[in-house]
Image: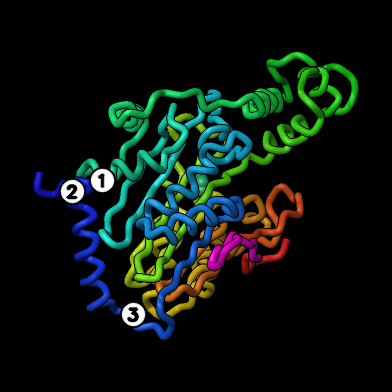
């Protein structure tokens, strides 16, 4: 098929497009490119791994995917890949997208089940098909065809959190279908009775995520010294979502966008609000028109705020962050709020690797809680 690029042709066309972009790139910036990786806060190890991979001369997209694979495979990260919190039916459904600057190609999967590393499947959609997005059963079938065996992604802690969430549900009259409702004692004690084999720390976490469903995600963006850029965003999406809900992460232009003539951007947090402003594309376009990464990200946050008529009380249930990396290596992380909605006083950070080790830097924030 004419459009279809095999992996070998894709690499060849990448090189040609990189040369063309270098000759005709619309933005002339003072600094020359350097190796740099930025990521959401949960990406300290991922960005370090991506940097090591970049330094070995590997393609920028392979580098960021190698980075986020660490988090996708980590059963203790409950917002991404294996170990992610499930939908309301107890099924872990994953979303991911990739975008490769040199070839200007992208791929994504949404609502995929049974595969721990959806970023790899998104890359295969990009390299092995002439489509961009596969969803649900079709995405899972494609993964099997590409040699990924079906795996159970629901770990024990996530299963307990799902059951705690179900127990926390009440109808308008305050009724629950679960036992224990009428027993005396504070809620924590009742939950401990319901889950006698679960330790206190896990139960406290489960009760927190039951009430404040997280939308954690990892976004990772890379620039190399040749000026090539790529990005990936991967997530288990919003905890307890309706089966089939798709967030921003697999939506090219919302959860991720890369134009290596300009820069790259990605997002974590409440996907619905990001989709409404096409955040990552907005940020890249802002940078194309001269904004710094910080200005471009803050402008995107202001667009989110505008959709809530700038009403801070209304916005208070939302958490959203953007990450922006410009083609000259300038970068920023921005967050709607200075602490997250669970009121756990977690300051928003993002991960940066431009030397050996990764470090956290604070996000610039739009509002204070
Ligand atoms: N940003 C992840 C999601 O909303 O699914």
Callout 2 touching callout 1 (CB < 8 Å)? yes
- The label shown at residue 127 is 1
Helix, strand or loop at label 3? It is loop
Q: Is residue 169 visible in this depiction of the protein?
A: no
Q: Residue furthest right?
A: 185
Q: Quote the CA–CA distance across marks 3 and 2.
A: 28 Å
Can you tell which quarter of the image residue 141 is in?
top left
Q: Percent x, y for residue 239?
A: 58, 36
Residue at the image position 86 percent from the left and 17 percent from the top? 183
Q: Is residue 199 left or right of residue 359?
A: right
Residue range highlighted in magenta: 351-361
Q: Is residue 100 magenta?
A: no
Q: Percent x, y for residue 201?
A: 79, 34
Residue at the image position 45 percent from the left and 68 percent from the top? 35
Asked whether 47 or 270 is in front, the reply is 47
Q: Is residue 78 above or below residue 34?
A: above
Helix, strand or loop at label 2? It is loop
Can you tell which quarter of the image residue 150 is in?
top left
Are there few (<14), some (14-19), or many (20+) residues within 10 Å of tag 2?
A: some
Q: Is residue 240 above or below residue 5?
A: above
Residue at the image position 86 percent from the left and 25 percent from the top? 189
- The label shown at residue 27 is 3
Quadrant containing the N terminus is top left
- The label shown at residue 167 is none
Q: Is residue 355 magenta?
A: yes
Q: Is residue 191 visible in this depiction of the protein?
A: yes
Q: Percent x, y for residue 72?
A: 51, 40
Query: For mark 2, what is the residue?
Result: 5
Q: How many marks?
A: 3
Q: Is residue 289 above or below residue 137?
A: below
């Amino acid at each position: 098929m004419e459009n279809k690029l095999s992996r070998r042709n894709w690499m060849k066309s990448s090189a040609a497009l990189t040369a063309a972009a270098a000759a005709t790139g619309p933005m002339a910036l003072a600094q020359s490119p350097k190796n740099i990786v930025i990521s959401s806060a949960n990406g300290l190890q991922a960005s370090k791994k991506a940097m090591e991979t970049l330094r070995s001369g590997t393609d920028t997209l392979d580098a960021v995917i190698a980075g986020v694979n660490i988090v996708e495979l980590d059963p203790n990260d409950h917002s991404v890949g294996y170990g992610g919190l499930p939908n309301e039916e107890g099924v872990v459904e994953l979303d991911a997208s990739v975008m490769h600057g040199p070839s200007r190609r992208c791929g994504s999967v949404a609502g995929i089940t049974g595969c721990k590393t959806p970023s790899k499947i998104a890359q295969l959609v990009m390299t092995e098909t002439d489509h961009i997005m596969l969803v649900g059963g079709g995405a899972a079938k494609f993964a099997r065809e590409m040699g990924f065996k079906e795996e159970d992604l629901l770990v024990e802690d996530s299963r307990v959190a799902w059951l705690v969430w179900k127990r926390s549900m009440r109808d308008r009259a305050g009724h629950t279908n679960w036992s224990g409702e009428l027993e005396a004692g504070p809620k924590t004690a009742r939950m401990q009775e319901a889950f006698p084999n679960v330790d206190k720390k896990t139960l406290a976490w489960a009760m927190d995520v039951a009430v404040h469903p997280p939308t954690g995600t990892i976004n990772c963006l890379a620039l190399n010294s040749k000026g090539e850029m790529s990005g990936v965003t991967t997530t288990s999406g919003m905890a307890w979502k309706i089966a089939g809900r798709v967030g921003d992460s697999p939506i090219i232009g919302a959860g991720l966008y890369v134009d290596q003539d300009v820069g790259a951007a990605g997002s974590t947090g409440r996907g619905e609000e990001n989709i409404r402003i096409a955040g990552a594309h907005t940020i890249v376009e802002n940078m194309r028109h001269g904004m710094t990464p910080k200005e471009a990200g803050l402008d995107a946050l202001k667009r989110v705020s505008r959709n809530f008529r700038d009403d801070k009380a209304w916005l208070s249930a939302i958490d959203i962050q953007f990450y922006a990396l410009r083609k000259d290596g300038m970068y920023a992380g921005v967050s709607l709020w200075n602490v997250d909605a669970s009121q756990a006083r977690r300051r928003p950070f993002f991960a940066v690797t431009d030397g050996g080790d990764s470090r956290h830097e604070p996000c610039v924030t739009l509002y204070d809680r």
